[in-house]
Amino acid sequence: MEHLNCKQFVEFLDDYVAGAQPDEVRRAFESHIGCCKTCLEFLEAYKATIETSRKACCCGHKEIPRDKVPQGLINAILKARKAGEDS
């Protein structure tokens, strides 16, 4: 794979960020972001989104104590999960 277009860039984005691309694809990917400002900005935003999501989900506790979660919220989540399984 010598060249990569913007559509292919998006298709390989997850693997690139995870470091799971073969060398040939990684080189094509990096060559593309070296000359495509739009894809470089997209990659930077994508990485920032991942980092922000990780920070939002990590409050320093391994588990939220069950007595701190409102019962109504628990019931709503369980109901939504069941509805998703039934469809």
Image (spheres, helix red, strand yellow):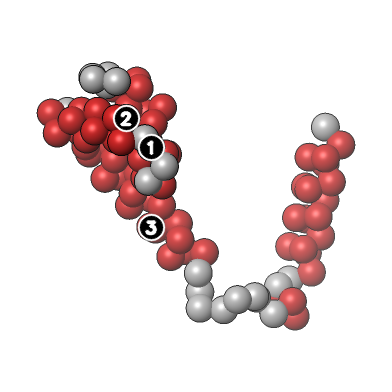
Q: Nearer the viewer, residue 5 or 83?
A: 5
Of the image marks 3 and 2, the number of the one nearer the N terminus: 2
Quarter assignment of residue 24: top left
Q: Residue at x 13, y 28 (%)?
A: 35
Q: Which residue is mark 2?
A: 25
How packed mark 1 is, by other alpha carbons closer than 10 Å (few <14, some 14-19, many 20 or more), is some
Q: Which residue is mark 1?
A: 21
Residue 29 visible in image: no
Q: Is residue 60 left or right of residue 35?
A: right
Of the image marks 3 and 1, the number of the one nearer the N terminus: 1
Image quarter where the C terminus lies is top right
**Distance between the Cα atoms at labels 3 and 2?**
24 Å
Q: Residue at x 29, y 20 (%)?
A: 1
How packed mark 2 is, by other alpha carbons closer than 10 Å (few <14, some 14-19, many 20 or more), is some
Residue 51 - label: 3
Please give the count of numbered marks on the rendered protein: 3
Of tags 3 and 1, the one toward the viewer is 1
